[in-house]
Amino acid sequence: MRKILLLLFLSCATIYAQDDIPKDYFAKPLDVPIILSGNFGELRSNHFHSGLDIKTEQKEGLPVLAAADGYVSRIKVDHYGYGKALYVVHPNGYTTVYAHLQRYANDVQSFVKEKQYARETFELELFPDKEQLLVKKGDIIAYSGNSGSSGGPHLHFEIRDASERPMNPMLFGIDVGDSKKPLINSILAYPVGEEAAVNRSQNPIRLKLILQKDGNYKTENLTTIGKIGFGLSAYDQQNGASNKNGVYQINTTYNGEEKFNILFEKFSFDETRYLNRFIDYGYWIKNKSRVQKLFREENNPLSIIKNEDNDGFINVKEGLQSVFKIEVCDFQGNKVLISIPIEGKIEEINDTKKIKETEDYIIANQATSITKGKYSIYIPAGSLYEDMYLNIKVDGDTLVFDKDEIPIHKNITISYDASNYKEEDLENVYIGRLNWRKDAYYNSTYRNGSKLSTKIRTFGTYVIAADTKPPSIKALNLTDRKWISDNKTIQFRIDDNNSGIASYRATVNGKFILMEYDYKTNLLTYDFSDGIITDTENNLKLIVIDNAGNTTTFEATFFRNQS
């Protein structure tokens, strides 16, 4: 029986998959071949990717189709994140999500535009009644785009269960061609505890990978002792694209016994930020390679871990010869096997683990308040994943709050006593984080009297900065007192090189007009098809405000033939 179970384990079988998932209920949301730029569960900044990123032939405007019958339950329009997104609930309890849209279609577009004008805002979130916006399978519900935080034209497509947990759309029969094996980037070994070492080191080490004739890998021989864990950096590529996407399944064994299984089939949004505990965060910051830890540390509740023995760790004793194996699989069953030969041996340590002790030791499950100079720091319980020393220094208005090599889970509050500033100067002052160019990057700053506060989730150097320069506005296809009858749009480029754009508002002849802001290109666009402008002579007024409260106003008169 053990041999049979082991054979199943090593076959990349989806042994954890739910049997009740409908395989032919949902149709693909685009009438083009499904080629991916991103897949489900892929490791992203601070989160797991919750759907499929489907390529749209490097263009916008492809019809987006309802994957099944249902009703539009939610519509969200945002400058960032998903941009223009649409949520459809289906009779079987699942929800499909379509994001980074260029625009909505038919009744949905009319409904959204009506609400935007009624509320006089571009960004909004709507929850239509169940009977208000019904859709049929295959209906055009939107058009693909590049809105929000999208890095290029594509459709982000999700399937969520009745509890709003995203699931891998491939489980539902969304077919993606993939004949390629996963690609292995690196393997790391992690000694745990004072007695553990790998190749004479108490610190994590990267192992040399040796490609075998059958396409699998073997690492260099390890000499080790004590409690050890392993980490993996790998990715997968589907047919038709060179994008480095995530893997589907990772299984490990130690001397033939199962140790640790990871499966990217479903997760909860509540747990997705624990990705920063799952990966070697410091290694990612330094090397821009995400290493998945094939062991569970404290404060890691991730449900993608399906099976584990001793939290995935091994304990190597002197004189023991053993083998640790890692099997990496994609959804189509293509797999790569990595074998790590291990010899239990006590050796003299030549690379000891270094812990830099400071005066600020933080206990992860306790709230901590720290005051240094004019800065106060509040670290809620659960902000850090483990107890540790932090390097915190203050020099005048500059706070060195350790380095961005440690992940932060919950928001930490930084406050500054700005009573030494004049009242009129405080209007344009904020707390900013220094970037690699030593420029202060704006952090949302709140003011209570002379106290400035901001919430952060990234360690680094913070300063008190001021922005007294108003935003810039440049008209791209409009000149004062000129005719623009042939224009389909009015476009501006708005920019603020310091604190960034906070808000904008445009009117023509005193009436609100809807302008769409693309922060990636700094473009602000009004579309005449809205039908709001009906006069021949029109007085336009555009007000743009930055995050420090500086304001710029643009005014012009234009003429337009309405016949």
Image (tube, grey):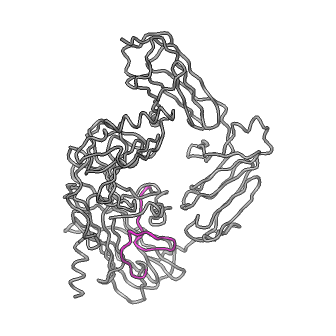
Q: Is residue 306 left or right of residue 126?
A: left
Write the residue at 39% across / 37% down: 111
Q: Quadrant of residue 231?
A: bottom left
Q: Quadrant of the C terminus?
A: top left
Residue 241, position as x, y percentages in the image: 25, 49
Asked whether residue 313 is in view, the answer is yes
Name the residue at 54% across, 61% down: 407
Can residue 12 be seen? no
Residue at the (67%, 32%) spot, across then down: 468
Bounds of the magenta segment: 288-310
User: Residue 20: x and y, percent?
Assistant: 25, 68
Residue 154, how many percent across, how many down?
A: 32, 43
Taking the image as shown, residue 371 lies to the left or right of residue 341, namely right
Q: Residue furthest bottom?
A: 319
| 300 part of magenta stretch | yes
Tell me which corner region of the image, top left, top right, bottom left or bottom right, holds residue 58.
top left
